[in-house]
Amino acid sequence: MTPQARADSAPGPPAGRRLAQLAGLEVTVLRGVGPAVAADLAELGITSVLDLLAHYPRRYVDGTRMVTVDRVAGGDKVSVLAEVASLRSVPAPRGRGRAPSRVELEVADATGRLRVVFFNQTWRARQLPTGTLVLLFGSVSDYRGRLQMVNPTAEVLRGADEDDGPAEGDASGRVYPVYPLTERAGLTSARVGRLVGEALDRAGPFADPVPAGTLDRLGLLDRTAALAGIHRPVTPEEVEPARRRLAFDELFRLQLALVLRRRRLREDARGIRHATARADGGPTLLDRFVAGLPFVLTGAQRRAVDTLVEDLAGPLPMHRLLQGDVGAGKTVVALAALLVAVDGGRQGAFMAPTEVLADQHAAAVRRLVEGLTVPAPGAPAGERPLRVGLLTGRTPVAERADLLAGAADGSVDLLIGTHALLTDEVAFGSLGVVVIDEQHRFGVEQRAALREKGRGGGGRDPDLLVMTATPIPRTAAMVVFGDLDMTVVDELPPGRRPVTTSWLRTPLEAAEAWARVREEAAAGRRSFVVCPLVEGSDRVEAASATAEAERLAAGELAGLRVGLLHGQLRPADKEAAMEGFRTGALDVLVATTVIEVGVDVPDASVIVVEDADRFGIAQLHQLRGRVGRSGEPAWCYLLSEADTPEAATRLGALERTTDGFVLADVDLDLRGEGTILGARQKGRSDLRLARLLDDRDLVVDARALADELVGADPRLEAHRLLAEELRLFVDEDEAGFLFKS
Ligand code: ADP
Ligand code: MG
């Protein structure tokens, strides 16, 4: 154990108040919190003192940087911090046309007074009684020789009946935290601030689970200073170091949980030692597969396969994430792992998030394993063709029964499917390897469910490989998939050409795209047209795709053979559309985003995305990955008339680069962590302050510290405070799993 790691393992409770104690204190212990205020706080999700202290300001108003009233000039757009000095409500005059009601204020700071008028907002009189300290933002105009603000935005920083220190009219020189509030919670930001202040004064100082030496090494504040700095900064500069420390705590707890989880999975495991070589030295099924491929594996694929094979041969079940850019050839790598299982007489399962994708995988896998055989004692030549099954929610009853029987008796070697694979009626004779494609759509629970299936059959844990559709940034992967090992396929097959991408902003510019589609069709190549997403309804989306296909077939693409693919089609019609497009019976496939992932038609050279601004970066990158797979030139046209900065950033990034890892960073930057973390981190373990892009260094530090601690003390027995905090933030089941002995 390192000295740092040992520092908080001294016997006896650590000095200061512990989070678990704060979690056990109701907010009603605070002065001035009776049932009414408690109800208001509950509205904000705050019931304990810990909740209150973790209710962080959403921003700060720096009183020292405001424009004082004497410096305000007509035509300026300004923020003014001032107190309401007088208030007059003027109701709308009766029966005289459209004259609006008015609320007229005079606000004052130490330097002067300013007139403020709200039209048709009678409620402002209640919001802003005399004595209220308010932050106003808006334009200043000249009205009959007097400066005034009309309908500014107004944020109450201190209610009229509240006293928080500064002398009357002297609001400058302070930093005001602005707390998130809801409409229904009848609280002001100042009120919340005062309650937090009382909590800090009465509950602190706080016990710190990270030893002082480690904090020094990482350049982090202690917890007491950090909580003060985030809630009551004296200068704006104090906020960021405080945020970093508290963000570190969030990330550290998460990494601890992940590192512990990974360790438990291993301790718990009864893995399969797959045979990866033959006793007679002859070629394995994997060798025969690789030799029979119509292409040579890339170096990156080769390395990835070697890593997987090593995992599979080992006694611990594989738990690995396979990342790679769109088109890097992850499917072949995953299939290699599945074939190792089959070679040992076991089965492989391959789970995809959508039916279209499951179909696609099944078709691709069947092509790739064609001609491969497995030993079959009773069969004529002692072997039979490898059997691939496809099971989705729409598999016909008889076929389904047949597949289920085959899965159970082991005669289906590879079972590909959707969530349908998780249902109870699916039982495997001997499940050896599980591949989950596009994991971000599956939950941890589903992963566990598949693992259980393996146990039920062969009694041992199958090996697990998770694949993502598009790359996710390294640090985000550490957070989301931190309990998995990671392999990156960081090389595209040779001959791939970057897809020429253009953002077309007007119908006139879009003509270029349609011309390209016609040209390519004339040369025997194919184009996708992706229709706009329709929020909420698959049916409406399908209808609009249908209409668009008809419109194009009669207009811009007249004379071409235009097909249609959307989620509402019957399976046979979907199949027919895909097949027609693959074989060239169709020139153009008008589709909804059902084609987003996996669809693989090498002769497709153009993809046109309509209303491209409605799609996310990852989605557009994935869509673009449908073309440029043959070594021939390929084009992606993003049609969008949107002129928002966000659209410009997204579409601009796609025009600029085809590197999925670069795009993943842009995406994270734009969207923040919420969407990446999705539903995976709920409840109290929410990352409130941590920002995965800005705080990359903290993620790495948190991971390293978690590895170090758990490595030396796998049950956190000498780190009881940490263990206690972790239990607070993970749910009971998870805690039971992490700490079981
Ligand atoms: P992704 O990583 O996006 O899932 P796929 O596995 O779908 O990529 O592979 C994309 C295409 O590239 C498929 O048509 C596949 O057969 C082909 N492919 C895979 N590996 C190679 C390779 N080493 N050389 C040439 N083509 C390859
Ligand atoms: Mg894929």
Image (cartoon, grey):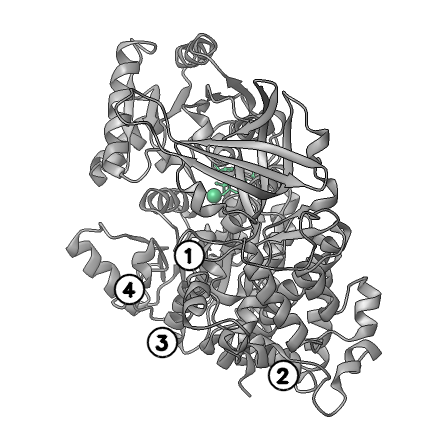
Residue at mark 4 to residue at mark 1: CA–CA distance: 14 Å
Badge number at residue 456: 3
Res. 586 in view: yes
Residue position for label 2: 715
User: Is residue 522 depicted above or below 232 in this figure?
Assistant: above
Residue position for label 1: 442
Task: Name the mark nearer the viewer: 3 or 4.
Answer: 4
| Disc 2, SS | loop
Q: Earlier in the sequence, mark 4 or mark 2?
A: 4
Q: Earlier in the sequence, mark 3 or mark 4?
A: 4
* Mark 1, other Cα within 10 Å: few <14 / some 14–19 / many ≥20: some
What's the amino acid at mark 3? Answer: Gly
Which part of the image, by quadrant, shows the N terminus? bottom right
Q: Earlier in the sequence, mark 3 or mark 2?
A: 3
User: Is residue 71 depicted above or below 323 in this figure?
Assistant: above
* Mark 3, other Cα within 10 Å: few <14 / some 14–19 / many ≥20: some
Task: Name the mark nearer the viewer: 4 or 2.
Answer: 2
Q: Is mark 4 within 8 Å of ligand 2?
A: no
What's the amino acid at mark 2? Answer: Arg
Q: Quadrant of residue 490?
A: top right
Residue at mark 3 to residue at mark 2: CA–CA distance: 28 Å
Which part of the image, by quadrant, shows the C terminus? bottom right
